[in-house]
Image (tube, rainbow, N blue to C red):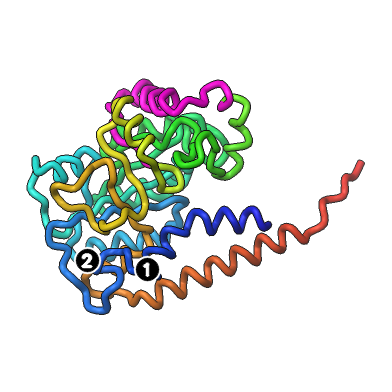
Amino acid sequence: MFRAIGERYRKNRWDLQGVLLRRYPDFVLDKEAASLETGIPVFVFHAVERGRLESQLRYLAENGYSTLRSADELLARLRGEQVAIPRSVLLTFDDGLESLSTAAFPLLRAYNMAAVAFIVPEFIGLPGFCTWEQLRELHESGVIDAQSHTLFHRSAPHWPRIVPCLDAAERCQAEARRSPSMADDYRLARERIEDRLRKPVRHLGYPDYDGTAESVAVSRQTGYVSNFWGLVQGRGVNQPGDDSFHTARLLDDYIFRLPGRGRRSLASILADKWRANSARRLRLRAACASPPPVATS
């Protein structure tokens, strides 16, 4: 239980810093809704709950927001190669979980929106994750732009530790020992996705939202043109001219803080997050306290 709670805190520490230390962008923190102007917020999702995602997409649609179609499109905006259109956002989904195909894909298509999926090639096909056949359908639809989330879901600051995701990390430990090099991992992840989906892969999303100076240098050397983090010091939304190797992302909760009709208060969003985390902790305690099943013959 304590390990699971520790993992939860570690994955959300940057979110706490963003709120408590006021490192998040103005539209998240300020009571009055601020204009995004040319800034492009990037939101990150993991497992998808249909009702929640539909309410988020409806909020975006009803308030005149459009989603970028790919990570390349964001890169072109940052480089000034395309005009930054007001009220543009980018949606990203990490890990390649099965709900990307079963829940997110049909909703995105229904709302004429798109997203980037950062996937872990060695996790694809394991229980709870998409299959390559599903990912091929998502890619060919033009709705999902599949990019790299490393070969084995490794933490850049704590290399070569594999960040837990369902039980995939345990299943992949033996295979992972054969390719511990960061350069090999990043290169093979890119090549594996390109081979399977027949598309270019040029963008890397960091597991645990955190990279290092070394990981940025290695990703450049192995063919990437951008890195996606979580909180980036001094940046909330991504502006033309910003360094693409330090692209900032926000949790999907803060979609409802974007300027618009029906905008929710920060207090209500944080209260919902607290209740959800409390319920999760109670479930973990109950699971740990339950006696093991008795074998019967």
Residue at 35% from the left image edge and 29% from the top image edge: 218
Of the residues shown, which amino acid type is indicated by label 1? Leu
Residue 242 x %, y %? 19, 48
Disc number at residue 67?
none
Q: Is residue 271 above or below residue 87?
A: below
The residue stretch that appears in magenta: 176-205
Query: Where does the C terminus fall, quadrant-wise?
Result: top right
Q: Secondary structure at mark 2?
A: helix
Query: Where does the N terminus fall, quadrant-wise?
Result: bottom right
Could you classify mark 1 by the number of other residues whose Cα lies within 10 Å: few (under 14), some (14-19), or many (20 or more)? few
Of the residues shown, which amino acid type is indicated by label 2? Glu
Residue 113 x %, y %? 25, 50
Residue at 33% from the left image edge and 25% from the top image edge: 222
Cβ–Cβ under 8 Å for marks 1 and 2: no
Q: Marks 1 and 2, how far apart in space?
A: 31 Å
Residue 261 x %, y %? 23, 74
Q: Is residue 18 visible?
A: yes
Does the magenta run of residues contain 180? yes
Q: Secondary structure at mark 1?
A: loop
Could you classify mark 2 by the number of other residues whose Cα lies within 10 Å: few (under 14), some (14-19), or many (20 or more)? few
Name the residue tied to disc 1. 21
Name the residue tied to disc 2. 62
Residue at 36% from the left image edge and 27% from the top image edge: 190
Q: Is residue 203 above or below residue 200?
A: below
Between residue 185 and residue 91, name the one nearer to us.
Answer: 185
Q: Residue furthest right?
A: 297
Q: Is residue 226 above or below residue 232?
A: above
